[in-house]
Amino acid sequence: MDFKDEIKQIADKIEMQKDQIQTEEATKNAFILPFIKALGYDIFNPFEVIPEYVCDIGTKKGEKIDYAILKENKPIILIECKHWKSELNLYESQLLRYFHVSKAKFGILTSGIIYRFYTDLKEPNKMDEKPFFEINLTDIRENQIEELKKFHKSYFDIDNILSTASELQYTNELKNMIHNEIINPSEPMVRLLAKNIYSKPLTSKIIEQFTELVKKSVNSVISDIITERLKTVLIKEKEAETDKKKEEKDNIIKDDGINTTMEEIEAFYIVKAIVSKRVALSRITYKDTKSYFVIMLDDKIQKPICRLEIGKNTIILTTFDEDKYRKRHKLNSLEQIYDYSKRLLDTVDKYESSNNKK
């Protein structure tokens, strides 16, 4: 299993188990120790990972941080852990104190779900107030996996990490600023945009008016970008589906009288959009019969995600519980499939959980 798969496995485990995790200690055992292990460190080897690592602070003796990762018998990463529901902002000063008295170059503050990485970019031996890298295991992006991989034992190189840490930190701050401007445009931003299209003096009333116009315009641009990207993805998928059918000599209207309708294809893409949160798009397939249209996982009829019966005036969606018990739902439109997202995701999670146990 490669690094990406290990991290994804931890993320899947979090989704399934977090509601049962009631304490900080349970968070460490269920989520954080597997994460440290995924980074290539032997959690049972005291020459690599030390729990309750002593960080004496001034006159305070016996102060301990949850874990220290060692290299050549020296701490390189300090990890402060909190319960998965904790608000991490409340504990940054705690990690800062430990970092100050340690020779470790990196500090991690984590809830087992969110991991914040700190170093001393602005002032040597003093931890920065803001992390240079943050990752949420339940919402991982491809580029974040590559950054996280730099902390793996096999690739760990302080100079290499620091060379990109500054860029990451500035990028994160810029993203936050842009996000805030999108949600609530500041007066300087509104003035900058307004003065290019409004020739009269910018009074407070005009600024207020343009603030709302900027909000609407930004949201419209974002919506247009998302729509265009979705169209591109759907076009590519439809082309790939068409090519596949040509290769298999499988026409939409088959020799056995089965007619795969556009409504069924549209429903298929809706279900793909929902369950792609859990599994790769390529693993979601369908089979059409004279009686129903089934969408399944891994092209296995034994792993149905849902079934559809689409008539002239009726749409019936059949979902499956963990024992594959069928439940029928009458829909008014295909868009209502989104109302059953949790049922579909639970079904996929059950199949994935069964695979992991084998």
Image (cartoon, rainbow, N blue to C red):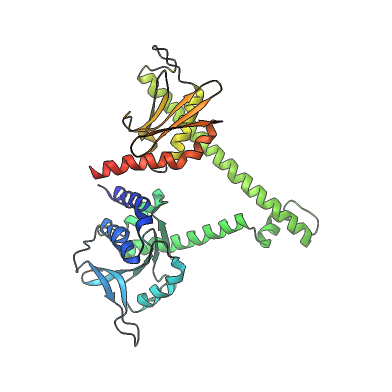
Q: Can you give x and y, in whole percent of width and height, for residue 26 in the image?
A: 31, 62
Q: Can you give x and y, in whole percent of width and height, for residue 267 in the image?
A: 48, 30
Picture quarter containing residue 303? top left
Up/down of 322 relative to 245, above or below: below
Give the residue displayed 50% in from the left and 38% down from the top: 338
Up/down of 54 relative to 116, above or below: below
Up/down of 114 relative to 77, above or below: above
Q: In this rendering, would 265 be left or right of 33?
A: right
Can residue 202 be seen in the rendering of this structure?
no
Screen quadrant of the C terminus = top left
Q: Can you give x and y, in whole percent of width and height, for residue 72 in the image?
A: 21, 69
Give the residue displayed 68% in from the left and 52% down from the top: 214
Q: Can you give x and y, in whole percent of width and height, for residue 300 in the image?
A: 31, 30
Up/down of 51 relative to 297, above or below: below
Q: In this rendering, would 195 be left or right of 256?
A: right
Give the residue displayed 45% in from the left and 63% down from the top: 169
Q: Residue furthest right?
A: 200
Give the residue displayed 42% in from the left and 70% down from the top: 121
Q: Nearer the viewer, residue 282 or 343?
A: 343
Picture quarter containing residue 255? top left
Can residue 34 be seen in the rendering of this structure?
yes
Picture quarter containing residue 49? bottom left
